Every structure is written in C-alpha cells, then in structure tokens.
Image (cartoon, rainbow, N blue to C red):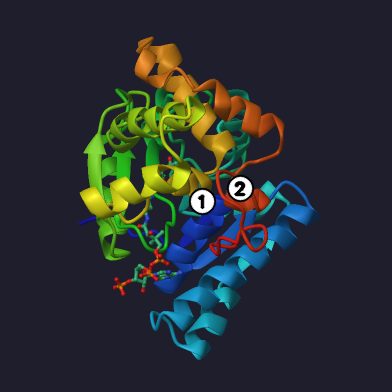
C-alpha cells in the first residue's frame, strides 16, 4: 500500500511554491510554508489570496472553502517548522548552491523517513540529492505554472531514488488530481526540453523584428490552438526563470536551440521580468496581474 503524506511543507512561496501549497491545501492537507523573510511571507499571502479569489470567480471553489483552504496554510520564515513533515517540496529560485543548502538543512531538520522533493525546472536532482544523507528519499516534483490549474507533474527519479518513494509520490499526486509522469534526470526533463527551444525561437523572431509580438502570439493561439502565445507564456513563466532554464539546458547540451536569446538578458537587466514585475513583452495592470493594458 502506498505511504500517505499527511503533513507537507513547501520551502519558497514564490509563484510556483505558493501554487503548490494551494494544490496541497485544496485536498484538505495541512501545509507549512516557509519563505526567506517577512516580505516573502506577505507576498505569498497576497499571491494565495489572488489565486484562490480567481478560483472562486471561475466557480472552482466556494467562498467558505476558500477561507478554509487559506486557513490550512501556515507561512513563516523558519525551516525548523518543517520538523514534523512527511514530505517537503522545495521551490526556491533555480540556483544550485541555494537548493543544495536548503536540502542540506532539511536533511538535518526532518526525520530520516521524510521525503524531500525539489521543484527544479532544469537543474540536476541528482546533484541536489547529493547534498543530503538520504539521496534515496529525494525526488524531483516538477509542477507547471499555474500549478492549481495544470495537471502535469514530472516526477524525476535519480539513480539513487528508492523505487517505493517514486511509487508513493506518484500515488499521492494522483490523489491530488494531478497527472504524474516518471522520468530520469536530464536538464529540462520532458516538457521544458521541448518547450523552451520554441519559446527561445519566438524571442529571436521579435528580436530580429521578423514579426510583432501580437502576430507571433496570435499565430500560435489561432493557428495551433495553444492557450497562450509564446511571448505571453514567457511573461507568465517569468523571463528570469526562463533564462535560467535555457542557460542550464544550453550548458548541458550545447545545443544552440537553447542558447538564450540576447534580448531576454537585456529585458531582465531592465527589470522587465513579465507578469510578476508588471511588465515583460506586454504591460500588465499591476504586478502579478493577468490583465494586459
Ligand atoms: N484555480 C482553479 N482553476 C482555475 C483557476 C484557479 N486559480 N484559474 C483558472 N482556472 C481554470 C478555469 O476554471 C478554466 O477551467 P475550465 O476550462 O474547466 O472552465 C481553466 O482553468 C482556464 O481558465 P480560463 O478559461 O479562465 O482561462 P485563463 O485565460 O484564465 O487561463 C491559463 C489561463 C490556465 C494560464 C491558460 O492560458 C494556460 O493553460 N496557458 C498555458 C500555460 C502553460 O503553458 N504553462 C506551462 C509553463 S512552463 C512551466 O510552468 C514549467 C516551469 O518550469 C517554467
């Protein structure tokens, strides 16, 4: 029988981490969220409020359920609060030393049976796991943005991950209504390895003034049936995150397809990070708003 995870933790409550916390809390689980500082906690609370309010507006959640869901997520700044968790997912920025440090700390704080999962998009789960004394209990759980809406979770097993841990995590994710796929540890896994070459190519097309952003996005929405065009999607993902993912894949494969388009770096330097900063390829009504102005 699959092991049950009752108390779950999430470290890093940015776009992905707070989305993952919402997914867990939606099924009645108690969630302990940890952010780096008080400002991060405030941002996470605001993100959770906005996302669940959107779910209520879309008829996916009742108002009373929203209050109960938010009540099940505690947010703080101390990793020690995770000492009783059965499962902890880290969703901090895509920075290997940072992830390694967090996993090492969790390894010291949590009991030996606690499963440690990384939401990395492109970094090596094997390398992250090597910073713990329990690499058999470490997996990748790669969620997709927006996590409360998209069903896919890539479950990444390393050569060290215990088979039972993979089975238990898959069963757990299925109970949450997710559709897990199990894969090995290679930069970009399945979806990002296929998606980011396409996104990068779209940036190069705008950069060379081959097509306007509106025409590019319309072509993929209206011609290919994608829910969003590539530039709107990059704004949703965050240009800094996209750059990190491309860079990691490029360094692993040396495939030019993944060499980040220079325009991406320029926009990041200028603070145009996408929806989260209020402006990327498009300008939004405010930070984190989906509404283009
Ligand atoms: N909670 C629950 N459900 C919600 C919701 C929420 N907060 N917000 C929207 N929904 C539901 C809606 O009810 C609707 O469901 P239905 O079809 O059953 O009625 C569905 O989601 C779509 O919502 P809307 O019709 O309101 O459309 P939106 O325009 O608001 O949808 C979107 C936005 C879901 C983001 C859609 O455009 C989309 O899927 N875009 C593509 C996103 C994508 O490709 N993400 C992957 C990025 S790559 C990644 O994450 C990897 C990482 O490593 C970078």
Circle nearer the viewer, 1 or 2: 1
Quarter of the rendered image showing ligand 1: bottom left
How many angstroms separate mark 1 from mark 2 (CA)? 8 Å
Instruction: Name the residue beneath numbered marker 1.
Output: 16
User: Which of these two is toward me, 188 or 166?
Assistant: 188
Based on the displayed image, in which of its 4 quarters is residue 197 positioned?
Answer: top left
Residue name at image x 52 percent, y 46 percent: 235
Residue 201 coordinates in the image, percent (x, y): 38, 28
Residue 205 lies, in percent from the top left, at 42, 29
Residue highlighted by disc 2: 12
CB of residue at label 2: within 8 Å of ligand 1?
no
**Along the viewing direction, whichever of 169 and 238 lies nearer the viewer:** 238
Question: Is 178 left, or right, of 142 in this rendering?
Answer: left
For label 1, count other residues whose C-alpha is less than 10 Å away and answer few (under 14), some (14-19) or many (20+). Answer: many
Name which residue lies at 67% across and 61% down: 286
Of 157 and 252, nearer the camera is 252
Position in image of residue 22 (x %, y %): 49, 65
Q: Quadrant of residue 150?
A: bottom left
Numbered circle sitting on residue 36: none
Report the residue at 33% width, 32% height from top.
Answer: 198
- Which structural element holds mark 1? helix
- Give the side of residue 37 with respect to residue 75, left or right: right
Question: What crowding class fits label 2: few (fewer than 14 Cα within 10 Å), some (14-19), or many (20 or more)?
Answer: many
* Residue 27 visible in rendering: yes
Marks 1 & 2, CB-CB < 8 Å contact: yes
* Vertical order, 171 against 234 (above or below): below
Q: Is mark 1 within 8 Å of ligand 1?
A: yes
Of the 4 image quadrants, the one containing the C terminus is bottom right
């Amino acid at each position: 029988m699959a092991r049950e995870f009752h108390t779950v933790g999430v470290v890093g409550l940015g776009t992905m981490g707070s989305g993952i916390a919402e997914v867990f809390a939606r099924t009645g689980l108690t969630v302990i969220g940890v952010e780096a500082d008080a400002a991060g906690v405030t941002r996470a609370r605001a993100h959770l409020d906005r996302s669940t309010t959107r779910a209520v507006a879309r008829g996916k959640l009742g108002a009373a359920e929203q209050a109960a869901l938010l009540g099940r997520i505690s947010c703080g700044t101390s990793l020690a609060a995770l000492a009783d968790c059965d499962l902890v997912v880290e969703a901090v920025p895509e920075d290997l030393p940072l992830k390694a440090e967090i996993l090492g700390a969790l390894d010291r704080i949590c009991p030996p049976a606690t499963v440690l999962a990384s939401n990395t998009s492109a970094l090596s789960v094997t390398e992250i796991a090597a910073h713990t004394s329990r690499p058999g209990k470490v997996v990748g759980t790669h969620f997709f943005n927006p996590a409360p809406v998209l069903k896919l979770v890539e479950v990444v097993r390393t050569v060290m991950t215990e088979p039972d841990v993979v089975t238990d995590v898959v069963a757990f994710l299925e109970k949450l209504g997710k559709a897990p796929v199990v894969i090995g540890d290679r930069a970009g896994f399945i979806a990002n390895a296929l998606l980011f070459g396409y996104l990068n190519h779209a940036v190069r097309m705008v950069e060379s003034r081959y097509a306007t952003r509106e025409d590019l996005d319309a072509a993929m929405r209206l011609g290919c049936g994608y829910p969003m065009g590539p530039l709107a999607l990059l704004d949703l993902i965050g240009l800094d995150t996209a750059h990190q993912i491309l860079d990691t894949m490029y360094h692993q494969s040396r495939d030019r397809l993944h060499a980040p388009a220079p325009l991406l770096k320029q926009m990041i330097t200028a603070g145009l990070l996408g929806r989260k900063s209020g402006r990327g390829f498009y300008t939004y009504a405010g930070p984190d708003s989906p509404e283009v102005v």
